[in-house]
Amino acid sequence: MSETRAIIYWLRRDLRLADHPGLAAAAASGRPVVPVFIHDESVAALGAAPAFRLGLGLERFGATLGDMGSRLILRRGSAPAVLQALIAETGAGAVWWTREYTPQAITRDSALKTALQQAGIEARSFGGALLFEPWTVETGAGGFYKVYTPFWRAVSQREVSAPDPAPARVRPPEAWPGSEALSDWGLGAPMRRGAAVVATHQAPGEAAALERLDRFIATGIGQYDACRDLPAGDGTSTLSDALSLGEIGPRTLWHRAGEAAHKGAQGAETFLKQLVWRDFAYHLMYHTPHLLSENWRPGWEVFPWATDPADPGFVAWTRGRTGVPLVDAAMREMYVTGRMHNRARMIAASYLTKHLMVHWKLGMDWFADCLTDWDPAANAMGWQWVAGCGPDAAPYFRIFNPETQAKKFDPKGRYRNHWIAEGQAEPPRAALSYFDAVPRSWNLRPDASYPPPIMALDQGRRRALSAYASAFSQGSDGKLA
């Protein structure tokens, strides 16, 4: 009986057809498949920009399924209750899904799998979100890797299976269960007037992601190593938002970049290392889930970070008004596009946590609200790495100087001028869009004066180094002694 009953396929951050092992298996089974997305507690907890981007992705993936004679069923509620209701409505004999790795998801999915199996319902979880499952990569001593370079050496020569092709058909059930309307969820509402600005910079959906990948492989990956740190250029794949929602799979990226490397593309290995860095973040989150909420390294509780969201430095940073042009340009890029160049992210995060000595969790939570490419593991590890309290963060006392970084990576000021309107007689549209995107309550105008630095860079550096010296004993290797 269970071999012919429908499969409920529970979609989460895997809104694609190709490179989707679970969906490929469901389609190949010949059984009816009911794709469903559930607005549960994890969706309700999303920040404004990630929720907005999710809504765009769901709309596009629903249309994709519709074009092949299927549907995307939308339901709101706790996942166990919603799935039990759908089983009763459809007579389904199975619930399948792609694995997630946050501690909350693991707890939820483990309990659900047990409950379904006890009720006689087949419950299966599949890989597909990562290149390597976290429990399959171990050191010689049997533990997990805590440093990236040996992790890369351990996995770089492993075989990564070829991505599954998109199924030609996903068999529909004889009768579809009811679905809620995506518009009723209001996923974009918290963005307020910023939604209209950010929307013009989005290209949701699997087809758009594959087009971007084709363009990057054809014109960008060869120069990736040389150009990826130049924020004013077009040197990255711009696929972070699609990867975060699973609109493109990591195996697809791995094999396409690997083919480019085989053909001699100079930047391909660096791109592959970035994909593995993403896996590294997820493996660390899996093995040490406190990465998401606490200092990863012990002993950092004594560091005197500011923790008040009303801290003047934090407020100035959030508004792109620190008086440090590269930092402010980075923040403004985020408000207009929903993304921020990776080099700019590191500089903005370093300035907040070191020059201003504001706690990394305030910055991490702010990014979680403002980035359309938000990713739980990458966001947490990135902030802790820059702040010095995270994995692989040696030397912890390294402080990015925004002025020297600007000279090196934005020597002609193209990035800064593109995003900062104040002081320009004819500012570009992108710089003006910032004032259309941010809350009116900030009372910002493009014809206002650009602020002086809220803190001299040398003063902030000296203060941070003094705080490190007071809090920690520094070993010769730059790590906590």
Image (cartoon, helix red, strand yellow):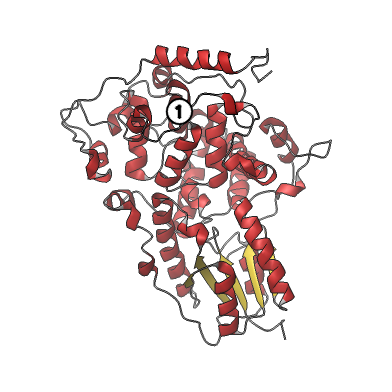
x then y, percent, for residue 351 = 43, 25
Q: The residue tagged with tag 1: helix, strand or loop?
A: loop
Residue 347 visible in the displayed image: yes
- Label 1 crowding class (10 Å Cα cut-off): few <14, some 14-19, many 20+? some
On screen, residue 263 above or below 229: below
At 63% from the left and 34% from the top, the residue drawn is 296
On screen, residue 252 above or below 16: above
What residue does disc 1 label?
Answer: 306
At 57% from the left and 31% from the top, the residue drawn is 385
On screen, residue 316 above or below 252: above
Could you say which quadrant of the image residue 348 lies in?
top left
As rendered, which of 428 and 336 lies closer to the eye? 336
Furthest toward the right, the residue is 141
Residue 263 visible in the displayed image: no
Residue type at the position of mark 1:
Ala
The N terminus lies in which quarter of the figure? bottom right
x then y, percent, for residue 53 = 41, 54
x then y, percent, for residue 453 = 31, 20
At 66% from the left and 49% from the top, the residue drawn is 131
The C terminus lies in which quarter of the figure? top right
x then y, percent, for residue 79 = 56, 68
Could you say which quadrant of the image residue 146 lies in?
top right
At 34% from the left and 28% from the top, the residue drawn is 312
**Count of numbered marks:** 1
Q: Horizontal placement of 377 versus 315: left or right?
A: right
As rendered, which of 326 and 455 lies closer to the eye? 455
As rendered, which of 47 and 149 lies closer to the eye? 47
